[in-house]
Image (cartoon, rainbow, N blue to C red):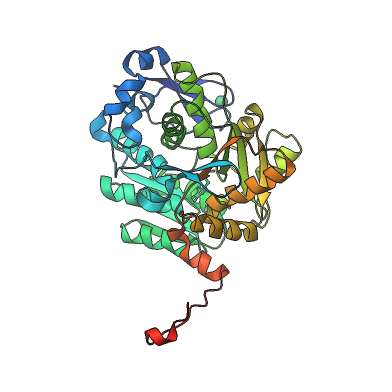
Amino acid sequence: MNYVLHLECSKCKKEYSADKIQTVCHDCNAPLVAVYDIEKVKESLDKSALKHRRPDMWRYIELLPIEDERNIVSLGEGLTPIHKLDLGLGEIYIKDDGIIPTGTFKARGLSMAVSKAKEFGIQRLAMPSAGNAAGAMATYCAKAGTEAYVIMPVDAPIGCKIESYMTGAKVYLVKGLISDAGKIVAEGKERFGWFDVSTMKEPYRLEGKKTMGLEIAEQFNWELPDVILYPTGGGTGIIGMWKAFKELQEVGFIGEKLPRMISVQAEGCAPIVNAFKERKKESEFWENASTIAAGVRVPKAFADFMILDVVYESKGSAIAVSDKEMLESSKQLARAGVFVCPEGAATLAALKRLFESGEVGRDEKVLLYNTGSGIKYTDVYSENIKLELPIVNSVEDIRI
Ligand SMILES: *Cc1c(COP(=O)(O)O)cnc(C)c1O
Ligand SMILES: [Zn+2]
């Protein structure tokens, strides 16, 4: 079973066979996206059937690109909880991908990409990563028995380095950013026979990320929130969610109304925000990118024009917040029961600003997307939050 008709260039719309290994469009070097036979999907998928499906992202199999389910490389990723937050600010929910295998939503894309690689018989995957994608790829490759080569910045969070190393991947560090790692992967493709799994240069990670949108729709009983805030780096998440909503409309599971998509970035690396302010279609390379939120430290997204398309089409916006605001918001969220990564915290920081400016109304239903666990960022947090904890020898030393 596989309802993918073909892959399509996101720019020129040229069609590519989904039966062969594909990367990007040969003419425009732009991402390829999967197009489904929606009529066939409709015939086999109905809302009630979902009740009996596996409780992970693979429950939406008709809208996923796998040919043979035996190729699925899964650790039970997806169907993460959505919590209502009692912050006294409005009707705010948070979808928590902090509890997914490998601790970040990157698991979704890499479960899919590693599964597709298995289906195509690809044995050697390589990827530049800000950290979390490396950990996820390493983990899923370990499960699949596929070789993994990952290159990340020297200052990537230690959790990502250890995770990648422990799972047996070949790990390399570069004194630079994810963009520098990307150049090395591109150069090593021929030399080492690497298959490049870079964000949006491999067509199927996006299909894994799409499940975030499918889940949001199902979990909200097919009534989407008014606004979704998403911390944006390479953009697979925001592009994937939007693709999910469009497909669900075509299948007839949801109505006309779609959420406004807000792309959240860091003040120290905000190429999408700048492009949005100037109503541009593409972003400029961001020099000297710097933020504690490693996942959004992406100076120029390969699919920047697609991210901006989603923002414009959804009548959303793009906004940057400071590292300091992220730290404050992460504390606030931890106190509400969710220990998030700085990227996830950025969405709450952004929401507070949007409430103030009136861009988001207090009566609107808002969803924050937490992309990862705070536990993966203990080095980043401990460098930025003063931990002055009293040492006690006996109960006599404690005053409450
Ligand atoms: C990669 C990453 C992001 C950005 O994701 P995209 O969907 O590629 O924009 C956000 N948060 C975390 C924790 C990440 O690892
Ligand atoms: Zn093209």
Position of residue 263 in the picture relative to residue 390 (left or right): right
Position of residue 229 in the picture relative to residue 34 (left or right): right
Q: Quadrant of the N terminus?
A: top left
Tell me what residue is drawn at x 33 percent, y 27 percent.
61
| Image mark count | 0
> In the figure, 217 relative to 76: above or below?
above
Please state which of residues 312 and 340 is positioned toward the viewer in this rendering.
340
Question: How far from the left and from the top, in percent, is residue 67?
Answer: 30, 26
Q: Quadrant of residue 4?
A: top left
Position of residue 207 in the picture relative to residue 141 (left or right): right
Please state which of residues 26 and 245 is positioned toward the viewer in this rendering.
245
Tell me what residue is drawn at x 48 percent, y 21 percent.
254
Q: Residue furthest left?
A: 70
Question: How far from the left and from the top, in percent, is residue 268?
Answer: 66, 56
Tell me what residue is drawn at x 31 percent, y 57 percent.
167
Question: How far from the left and from the top, in percent, is residue 10?
Answer: 55, 27
Tell me what residue is drawn at x 30 percent, y 22 percent.
49
Q: Residue furthest front?
A: 400
> In the figure, 34 relative to 292: above or below?
above
Q: Write down which quadrant ligand 2 falls in.
A: top right
Question: How far from the left and from the top, in percent, is residue 96?
Answer: 44, 46
Residue 197 in view in this figure: no
